[in-house]
Image (cartoon, grey):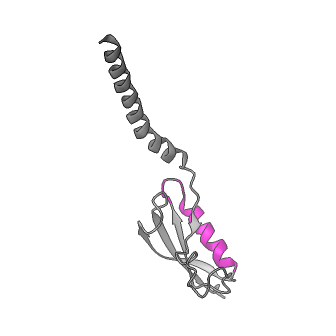
Amino acid sequence: MKLEWRYREGMATLWQKFRQMALLLPLILFGCSGGLAPYVHNPAEFNRDSPNFAKEPTDIADVAICYNSSSSTPQDILALAESTCAQFGKVARFDRQDLLQCPLLTPARAFFQCVPPAK
């Protein structure tokens, strides 16, 4: 009887530890991903049916930047948009933003229009 009781007690402790780890692991992983840099979002990038699949664009009219507001500054986002538009000889102008259209860890998206520089 004593052996059976110890076995059950040990299993209960094991399950408690497993539950604690199951709760802590996602929090630890989420905390480690705090340094997510903003990036250019192109939803059709992996669409093999797209006529522009695996081709570098020759001109762009706008750019979408996905970012996490807790780890990115507006200056970071603007700098990425400006460098992307500058590849085509244009400047970035803020258009709008939305939420929850990008992956979960970078839920915010900012849109910039790439316009010719003012003369």
Left/right placement of residue 24 relative to residue 114 reads left
* Vertical comparison of 32 with 89: above or below: above
Q: Is residue 103 above or below residue 83?
A: above
Residue lying at 62% horizontally and 82% vertically, measured from the top left: 53
| Relative image position of residue 85 (x, y in whole percent) | 64, 78
Q: Quadrant of the N terminus?
A: top left
Is residue 70 shown in magenta? Answer: yes
Left or right of 87 in this view: 18: left
Task: Return the residue nearer the eye: 8 or 75.
Answer: 8
What segment is highlighted magenta in the picture? 68-87
The x and y percentages for residue 72 are: 54, 57
Q: Nearer the viewer, residue 90 or 27?
A: 27
Residue 94 sits above or below residue 117 on the image:
above
Q: Is residue 111 left or right of residue 37?
A: left
Determine whether 30 is above or below 49 in the image.
above
Dividing the picture into quadrants, the one containing residue 12 is: top left
